[in-house]
Amino acid sequence: MTYLLAADIGGTKTDVAIFAADQGLSRPMHQATLASRDYASFAQLLTVFLQRVKLQPDRACFGVAGPVLNNRVKLTNLPWEIAGRDIAGQFALARVDIINDLVAVASSIPHLTDNDLLVLQHGTRQDKGALGVVAPGTGLGIAFCIWAGSGYLACPSEGGHAGFPPADPDELELLGFLLDHGIEPSFESLCSGSGLPNIYRFLIDTGGFAEADWLRAELAAAVDPTPVIVRAALGPGKRCPVCTETLRLFTGILAGACGHLAVTVLATGGIYIGGGIPPRILPLLQQKDFINRFTGKGKMSGLLAAIPVSVIINPKAALIGTAAYGLRTDDSQ
């Protein structure tokens, strides 16, 4: 029996599991979620996990938040560098595949069920049509899938670092704020966990919003300000108008990013929204404004109105996709 070691490696947390080839993707033999920054290296994290499970895997596949070149990656939001050859030698693995984390999410889509998705726009899915994935988490990941004859082929991109195109006067002013403060004017600088505070600061500095003392104190004490802003926008507990406006701008920019990807790859098979943030802001994504912004592409509006749009609500989707990629048969490698 083949045992696969799979991991979804993010800037905040790493999901790691061992799958048996004959037991499918829904039943990992062992699984854990570890705080990435608690470990000096990925090898150290793997050592801790494997010592716990006391099982030797045969091969491995890792989905990583960063550009993968020659089976090696330097993480974008974490000071780790991972090389497939080094990990294979250190842990006695016959094969190690390193894939972009959004390739992992994209690879999961054929294996997701209706229970894993929340539909925002039903549309009409075209058989074998391209699929688009947009995932705001610590950073902004973007990938797509194309039909490759016998199944979908997931393709990586660094589209999150594409230039941000403002769609209205508020966003034009926001772009100016990024430029004035020396912040990369990209989608990721706004539509991600690391980018959301930029919108918040823009509104405090230029939008006429007062920063409540209790909110300032919570933000100052937080390691990550994004959950504080989201909570102050949607509850539970105290709410703050500036945080509500921050999330309004954020969701509009996310809708715009989804629309840009849809027309770029002609994603008639659907747009899938992943990442850690969307499941926490579902009430905003379910409002008509989100789909109106997604479809508002002039001559392309009719095309976009027919494209299915869903939020991936299974938090283990990237891990499922990583395992699916790693467990492919040898003749499909």
Image: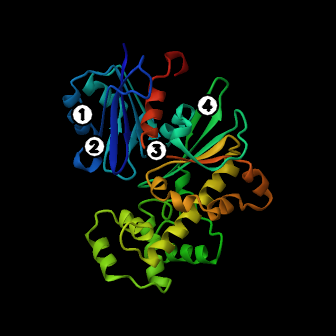
How would you rate the neighbour count of disc 1 (Cα within 10 Å): few for under 14, some for 14-19, many for 20 or more? some
Amino acid identity at mark 2: Leu
Residue 67: numbered disc? 3
In three-dimensional space, the C-alpha distance between marks 3 and 1, rounded to whole angstroms, equals 25 Å
Amino acid on which disc 1 is placed: Phe
| Tag 2 near tag 1, CB within 8 Å | yes
Q: Quadrant of residue 290?
A: bottom right
Which numbered circle lies on residue 152? 4
Q: Quadrant of residue 139?
A: bottom left
CA–CA distance between discs 2 and 3?
Answer: 22 Å
Q: Residue lying at the far front in this picture: please name it.
A: 236
Task: Say if 124 sits above or below 300 in the image.
Answer: above
Q: Which residue is mark 1?
A: 49
Do the residues bearing badges 3 and 1 touch, measured as CB atoms within 8 Å?
A: no
- Looking at the rendered structure, the secondary structure element under dot 2 is strand
- Report if residue 317 is visible in the image: yes
Amino acid type at circle 4 is: Tyr
- Label 4, label 3: how many angstroms apart (C-alpha)? 20 Å
Dot in front, 2 or 3:
2
| Percent position of residue 150, x then y | 64, 23
Quarter the N terminus occupies: top left
| Discs 4, 1 touching: Cβ within 8 Å | no
Q: State the separation of the CA atoms marked 2 and 4.
A: 30 Å
Mark 2 and mark 1 lie on one chain; the one further toward the N terminus is 2
Measured Cα–Cα span from mark 2 to mark 1: 9 Å
Please state if 8 lies on the left or on the right of 152 as rendered: left
Q: Is residue 13 left or right of residue 158?
A: left
Question: Which residue does the numbered mark 2 point to in the structure image?
Answer: 34
